[in-house]
Image (cartoon, grey):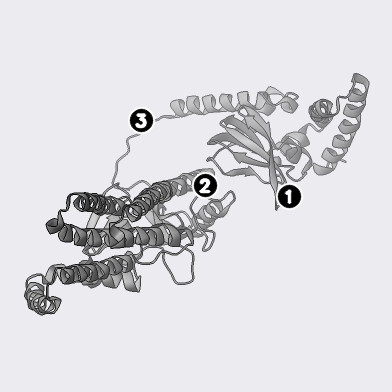
Amino acid sequence: MILTTMFTASIISVAFLITAALLRAFSPGNNTQIKRVAYFCLIYLLTVVFLQFSEIYAWSEASNTVDNIAFLTGWITIIELSLILLFKLALPKLGQHPPSIIADLFLGISIIILIALTLRNFGVDTASIVTTSAVVTGILAIGLQATLGNIIGGVALQLDRSIKIGDWIQLENGKQGKVQEIRWRHTVIQTRDWDTIIVPNSSLLSANIIILGKRVGEPLQHRMWVYFNVDFRTNPSHVIEIVQKALQAPPEILNVAKTPPPNCICLDFSGDNRDSYAHYAVRYWLTEINDDDPTSSLIRRRLYAALQRANIPLAIPASQLFIDNDNNERRKRKDQKNIEKRVEALKEIGFLKVLTEQEYMQLAKSLQPVLYTQGENIMIQNDQADWLYILTEGSAEVWVGSAKKQSKVADITAPTFIGEMGLMTGAPRSATIVASTDVYCYRLHRNDFQEIITKRPSMIEQISTVLAKREVETQTIKERLNKDAKNQKIDEISVHLLTKMSAFFGLD
């Protein structure tokens, strides 16, 4: 036979080595089948070598048996290599992933045919074997009903493709995991906890299985819930507005779908022994199902920061007792220390150095402490400007551009301040400021500053000069202005700012 020649054996050996190399390079996770092929290929090569020696030494009695073994193992090697090239390499590269059971069925039928041909070469009546095996098969089927049920389940799962490799599913016991492999008897599921669940295929067919994040004609996304509690005396509309605005504001939260957008709902008032608070939930749609807990953590961080900025504390159960030994004297000391800290922050702002100590104290009392979590916008370009921000901790990025394209131009680090032009002239924001870490800051509303200006309007001339110098310093670096040009520029900008500030504060 042609399979028993050294030339054919060499070709099959080279084909095996090439296939093994390709499989290792392009599909390193599929090494089990190539190992099995290696055993058949080795037996085939040994039988071919034996046949060469049998011709030399005239071992005619054993040569017929070895020849049939070479026929069987050689063809099995060829068929398995062909299936690997087709199902493990070629079709996946073309984006096709047919059920692995097709390859298994083709291999099984081929082996049965090869064994029948081999037995016929030995002079065995295959018809009688088929009759006998049918009786034996019937007996085994009765005794192995569970195993056969799993096998039939595996065939059904792979043919109808209701569950595919890569799907995230939830079992009836609540366990969730990613389908890694569907075998003849069982399905392999990998969980987020780095565990592996082996589920009999018959159980999958008989149970109600949830395929997470899957809907016909829709992208992969799974709804998640993040619960929190707020004192029930706080208006739910206000809570929902604050939370939704924070979660839907740019930049987008990683792994959270745009459609539907994250939203907030009020679930209950003083129910289930929750006598002191209302129960809320944030609902968002997760696009990367493996990252459920990290994404929920990002949601909670932004949620907490938004509530803190709006002075909405998270609820505390009423059943707890809080003993406070506070008194008026202690509260005064605490308030005074807080005011002194704010005054120090105000004195770091150059254009406010014209203020008196009393004016510093007045502004310090009106400052609002706020928190911006990493990734949140502190200011948005072209928005109406009402606040001056005094950064005390953290860092942020400065972005400018259009709605379609933004470019990062600078980094700023506390202690510093931003938004002075908006505070003094009402000019729209000239840049977007994004927190690159958690940023703690004070913010000063223009109405509070206007009270100071109204009482002592003469200060705006000094303030306009300081602001003009600050702006010219930036232009000097960019345009390399000399001293005379610099002074002239300061005078021009100072007059321009003075006019705008007077009009803005109604001092004309």
Identify the residue at image location x=49%, y=68%. Answer: 218
Residue to which mark 3 is pinned: 325
Residue 221 in sight from this viewpoint? no
Camera-nearest residue between 353 and 228: 228
Residue to which mark 1 is pinned: 402
Q: In the figure, 412 relative to 194: above or below?
A: above
* Quadrant holding the C terminus: top right
Residue 306 in sight from this viewpoint? yes
Q: Tell which circle, 3 or 1, labels the residue nearer the N-terminal end.
A: 3
**Secondary structure under the numbered disc 1 in the rendered image:** loop
Identify the residue at image location x=49%, y=62%. Answer: 94
Crowding at label 2, few (<14), some or many (≥20) Cα neighbours within 10 Å? many
Residue to which mark 2 is pinned: 306
- Percent coordinates x, y for residue 366 in the rendering: 62, 36
Name the side, left or right, on which 503 lies relative to 323. right
Crowding at label 3, few (<14), some or many (≥20) Cα neighbours within 10 Å? few
Q: Tell which circle, 1 or 2, labels the residue nearer the N-terminal end.
A: 2
